[in-house]
Amino acid sequence: MKSTIPTPSLTNPELGLWQYFPIQSNWQMFLVSLATLLTYYHTLDVPFYLDDFSSIQENPVISQWSGSFYELWQYAKTRIIGYWTFALNFQVHQFEVAGYHAVNILIHVLSGIAVLFLLKGMVRTPVIADSLPGFAKLYLPPLVALLFVLHPLQISAVTYIVQRLASLGALFYLLALACYLQMRLTSSPLQRMYWGLGTVLCALLAFGTKQHTLTLPVAMLLVEWVCFVPNWRRLLILVVGLIMVVIGLGVSWAWFLDFNPFSLTALESLTRETVEISRLSYFATQMQVLWTYLTLFIFPSNAHIDYAYPIVEDFLHPNMNYPLIARLLQSASIWALLGHVSLFAFALYLRRRCPWLSFAILFYYLAHSIESSLIPIRDVIFLHRTYLPNLALCLALGGFLTILLPRYLPKPSYLSPLSYFSPANSLALLTLALLISLGTATWQRNELWRDPIALWQHNVILSPEKQRGWIILGKHLIQADRPQEGIEALERSFTETLQSDGSYAVTLTPETALNLVVAYKKLKQYSQALDWVNRAFEFPNLQPTDRAKFLINQGNIFFELKSYSQAISSYRTALQLNPYSLNARINLASVLGVTGQIAEAKQLYQEVLKLDPNNLYVQGNLQRLQALSPR
């Protein structure tokens, strides 16, 4: 028998304070939107981080975009929708970060609303509806949506600009699932057609945003298997259809990327991001990473932007002197794998006993299956990858609060229905406290993102072995006119390698050397700065764009030394290596202006303002040159 939804009233002791929570969809959407804005409104000035520079700020495909989809297609075929939004952002906001953050926040708001309507559809499905009390049908969807938008683990996909790819892909993924549920629940053929078209459209947009959304067809099959009464004929048709869709997606994906879809070599190349990690090693590492993600969802205080996570070579304990059985029993990855297998088996067991929890567990593993399985990725852990899977954990937590916990609370007293000590009121206050705590943690964490030095200091405390953290901390200390502290941080990133003669050689990245050049220049130790430039030119496989950066800094040093001809030569060579470099143009224009070459300097400044019209430094210099030479 289906449970009924109680009508809220001021004298309903089963609801208590819950009755003041809005049950109308419009009010719930407003509440989800307001909660998101309150926790993210102050992130509009968060600067670019990590891949934001290469993907947006230094990416000529974005800054030089002519409006052609083909250009974006050539650059990011599997992420064209996401990069299209970056290109549109640039057309309006150039390099002003506020516009990019506003779009990211809007996507997060819409994702929360998509979760709301996905869950509202799910609680109406036959199997789920029969397993839920009326109280949960009312309050589970908005509670899960609020948990989803407020949890601090979502920050990396919202405040980190380029990871819009994760949140936007998740938005289309969730909308496709919501449309699919509506298509299954409606009895009108016309509405079913409309919802079906919406499903296909959102699915295509998801596939064009990020590769992790390719699990969407399996998610639809999971919805069908868990939420509806078994119809083996329908399931067989869906499975056959799913196999055809997966094959079609694989062939199309390979064809779009100019690979032979029937080549094993092409398949190998398509299903890895790096060759430095074997598939087995990556899988063994991910078995532990998944538990780390789960732990961080419960205790997010240790979350940080860039992890130093050890890569597991295989499932066996590394000590070869141990017997095989001992190596297996002492392997953390083996125990992690057994834990996941047990949880997965438990989800299958719960399919009819507790279908909402079964769905949550299975969806969690499905949503992680692309990035945490056998497809090696250079960075084995990044929190933006949890954005979509966190829906499953929010559903499990929301279900605990609205379904499981109320079962063990004492029945309310009908003699004092409005008692603030009633079980319903205690549960409402507990839920409110949890939401406020999550929102506060997210707000505080976002505040940390506003200060790059504080963010990376926090990172190196939690992951001191991570070389990249020290490099970026050093860079920001130098930019804050703290060059000596910056040098000390950069030196922490040095690694020593043992040579054949028994000596140790210090190795460092081009980015480290570049920051050292800037630091020594700020300290006016020009000979040391130029020495680092020359050492960098000897780095093997130094990319042209990196060489251009060193030449720009070399030119800056010559400019301060008033060696203007050498500065001009450095800047011009940098522009030859990287014709899209704004810094090379600006600095070349500055030295040309000083040496009286006004016409060319004005032309260069005007070229810069076409791409970065809000650059106050360039505007001021151009005005001064125009005053000197009006024509």
Image: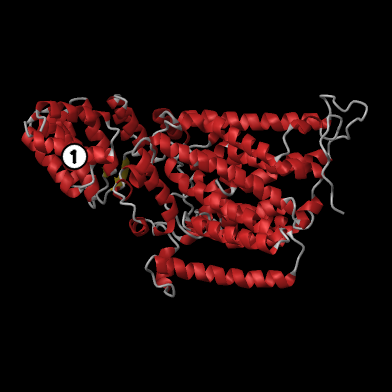
- For the residue labelled by badge 1, is the local secondary structure a helix, a strand or a loop? helix
Mark 1 surroundings within 10 Å by alpha-carbon count, few (fewer than 14), some (14 through 19), many (20 or more): many
Say how the picture is coloured.
secondary structure
Residue 588, image x, y percentages: 15, 37
At a point 13% along the width and 43% down the height, the residue shown is 572
Q: Nearer the viewer, residue 290 or 594?
A: 594
Residue 147, image x, y percentages: 63, 39
Residue 554 visible in the displayed image: no
Residue 474, image x, y percentages: 33, 32
- Image: 41 above or below 319: above
Judging by the rendered image, the residue that carries numbered circle 1 is 585
Q: Residue furthest bottom?
A: 262
- Choose top left, top right, bottom left or bottom right for residue 623: top left
At a point 43% along the width and 58% down the height, the residue shown is 78
At a point 15% along the width and 29% down the height, the residue shown is 526
Q: Nearer the viewer, residue 630 or 114?
A: 630
Judge left or right: residue 285 versus residue 123. Answer: left
Residue 88, image x, y percentages: 39, 46
Q: Nearer the viewer, residue 142 or 307?
A: 142
The quadrant of the image that shows the C terminus is top left
Q: Amino acid at mark 1?
A: Arg
- Image: 21 above or below 353: above
At a point 61% along the width and 43% down the height, the residue shown is 113
The quadrant of the image that shows the N terminus is bottom right
Judge left or right: residue 98 versus residue 365. Answer: left
Number of marks present in the image shown: 1
Residue 475 visible in the displayed image: yes
Q: Residue furthest right?
A: 415
- Choose top left, top right, bottom left or bottom right for residue 426: top right
- Choose top left, top right, bottom left or bottom right for residue 53: top left
